[in-house]
Amino acid sequence: MRGQFKIFRFAGISVYLHWSWFLVAVFEIQARVGAYTAPGWNILEYLSLFAIVTMHEFGHALACRSVGGTPDRIMLWPFGGVAYVDPPQRPGATLWSLAAGPLVNVALVPVFAVVMMLRPGGNLGEYLYSVELINLGLLIFNLLPIYPLDGGQILRSLLWYKMGRARSLMAATIVGLVGVAAVIVLALRSLDVWLLAITAYIAMTCWSGFQQARTLLRISRLPRLAGLSCPSCHAAPFAGNYWHCPQCATNFNIFQGGACPGCGHAFPLAACLECGRAAPHSAWAQLAQYTGARA
Ligand SMILES: [Zn+2]
Ligand SMILES: [Zn+2]
Ligand SMILES: [Zn+2]
């Protein structure tokens, strides 16, 4: 959380801004001087860009909450926003959490279209036209099927239904790596500093997603216990001794009796090793009939 400060809180979600935003704002506003007859419009235009970005991130955060996730905070960086959302690790829940961001931009398209029908002139007309293009640009950029952009993550969620958690991530990150290679060529040709920075960030995140998919794939082949499934991600628990007792350091299987065989310490909550959520043993048993009880 270094270099960040809270600007406001809405619906239980805190919005933070990074100090470097101001540096880039001055630079970007300067670059557009001349588009308007008064500099106030340049500032308004730049603030509007971030208002749209913030609404987009609130789309993700509120959708995540509606499926049982705990949206934490929204971070505004000079080149975009990030919503720290943690939807339940199921394809439907992640699909909705991801799609809700771009849907905010889709909802804004007719709003701008109606306003533009009034054919405002002068600075107001230039401003509205510019903000309309910013919204469309953000929508198209976010929908590129390059993991971790929304489009790439939406692709992953759709593939998840057919391919499962690990293979869908593997497929989406491979598509993303091919896509990012194309963007790197574009970025190097344009020598645009921001495009290069964003591309480097996307490439690194996509690569770590690919590594995560390899780990998930290895894990998915481990034997599992029948008749139980995680209330959050619906995966069946592992059959091995992968739980660790903090009292006596014994490794054991938490689903065999719910207590440590070394010291007898009781564990009323069992943590899912795949999605990280903990739930009472009864909740794991309740979902036993769920047909999709697999990773
Ligand atoms: Zn988004
Ligand atoms: Zn789980
Ligand atoms: Zn113990």
Image (spheres, rainbow, N blue to C red):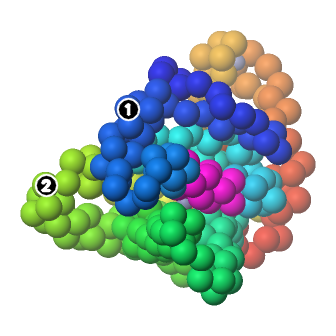
- Which residue is under mark 2? 191
Q: Give the magenta-colored segment's residue range.
A: 46-59
Looking at the picture, how far across and down is residue 100, in whole percent? Answer: 66, 67
The residue under label 2 is which amino acid type?
Answer: Leu
- Specify the principal SS of the magenta part: helix
Q: Secondary structure at mark 2?
A: loop
Residue 265 seen = yes
Q: CA distance from mark 1 to mark 2?
A: 20 Å
Relative placement, left or right, of 180 versus 9 is: left
**Residue at image x 74%, y 76%?**
291
Type of the residue with mark 1: Leu
- Is 55 within the magenta? yes
Q: Is residue 96 magenta?
A: no
Q: Tell me, for residue 110, which label it has, or none.
A: none
Q: Residue at position x 66%, y 17% from top?
A: 246
Which of these two is toward me, 234 or 194? Answer: 194
Residue 37 position (above or below residue 8): below
Q: Which mark is residue 23?
A: 1
Q: Nearer the viewer, mark 1 or mark 2?
A: 1
| Residue furthest out toward the left | 189
Q: Quadrant of residue 210?
A: bottom left
In the rendered image of this protein, does residue 165 appear above or below residue 237? below
Q: Nearer the viewer, residue 110 or 32?
A: 32
Q: Give the x, y percent position of residue 95.
A: 62, 69
Where residue 276 appears, as percent x and y from the top left, is: 64, 42
Circle 1 SS class: helix
Residue drawn at the location 53% of the way across and 41% of the way down: 76
